[in-house]
Image (tube, rainbow, N blue to C red):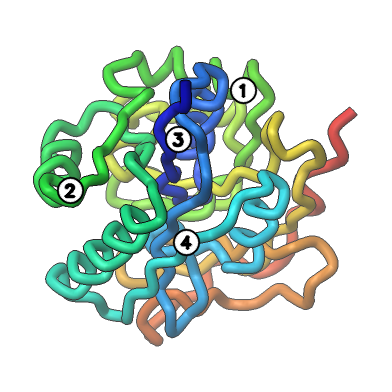
Amino acid sequence: MSVPRAVVAWSTGKDAAFALEEVRGSGSYEIVGLLTTVTEPYARVSMHGVRTELLELQAERLGFPLHRVPIPAPCPNSVYEAAMAEALGQLRADGVNHVIFGDLFLVDVRRYREDRMAGTGVAPVFPLWGRSTLDLAREMLTRGLRATVSCVDPRRLSASFAGRDFDERFLADLPPDVDPCGENGEFHTFVYDLPAFGTAIKIRRGSVVERDGFVFADLLPDGSPGPTVPQDGPTHSRVVENGAMGTMGSRRK
């Protein structure tokens, strides 16, 4: 008996990656691709500010095709919804029945996805929904997920957390009012190692900048030129820190 075909809503971060791990482990769906929103003028993954070169390395490690949803900058919600509707229509035509999301507990976000996808023939799936986020964060680490913080909302979390590895020390240092998985938007991550990758993606940190109210750590493939200032936002940027923080992501032993 065949299983439903699905793509993962892929942000390059830990929640999407762990949702993929859970679904692949269950065998409930056949994963056939990654669906990612890209801010086209800057060649960056939307919200996370991750370079598309790193997104492509993740897809290469996983062996999945990328389904990019290009959006402008700035992007009105109506434009985003139209672009996503077009992408869902194409996926449905290709035989995809579901999109896997890494949402954890925000009811309004889940309801929005369900409402926008109603009637498309493509249904949302939330394999991590309702789990303790502290337990989930620790399970991610125990099972070999490795990630670096690419974006911080400094209204919720100190800018000093940008560029740090998502690890036990990071979790211990979080203020008590910050969700361990950053589900309220406190921080976003880039996954550089996952059991399914086979080998880790070697990255290093370039400049850390503040722009449009957020702090971004520019993550670069190891060996690429840098440090540089990320270009996924308004031109009014303030460099918080320049330099590299060594190489993050070694070959899996």
Measured Cα–Cα span from mark 1 to mark 4: 28 Å
**185 shown above or below 135:** below
Measured Cα–Cα span from mark 2 to mark 1: 32 Å
Residue 241, image x, y percentages: 59, 66
Q: Amino acid at mark 1?
A: Leu
**194 shown above or below 141:** below
Query: Which disc number belongs to residue 15?
Result: 3
Measured Cα–Cα span from mark 2 to mark 3: 20 Å
Query: Which disc number belongs to residue 117?
Result: 2
Query: Which disc number belongs to residue 67?
Result: 4
Between label 2 and label 1, give the one nearer the viewer.
2
**253 shown above or below 234:** above
- Provide the secondary structure element on which disc 2 rests: helix
Residue 212, quarter of the rendered image: bottom left
Disc 1 or 4, which lies upstream in sequence?
4
* In contact (CB < 8 Å): disc 2 and disc 1: no
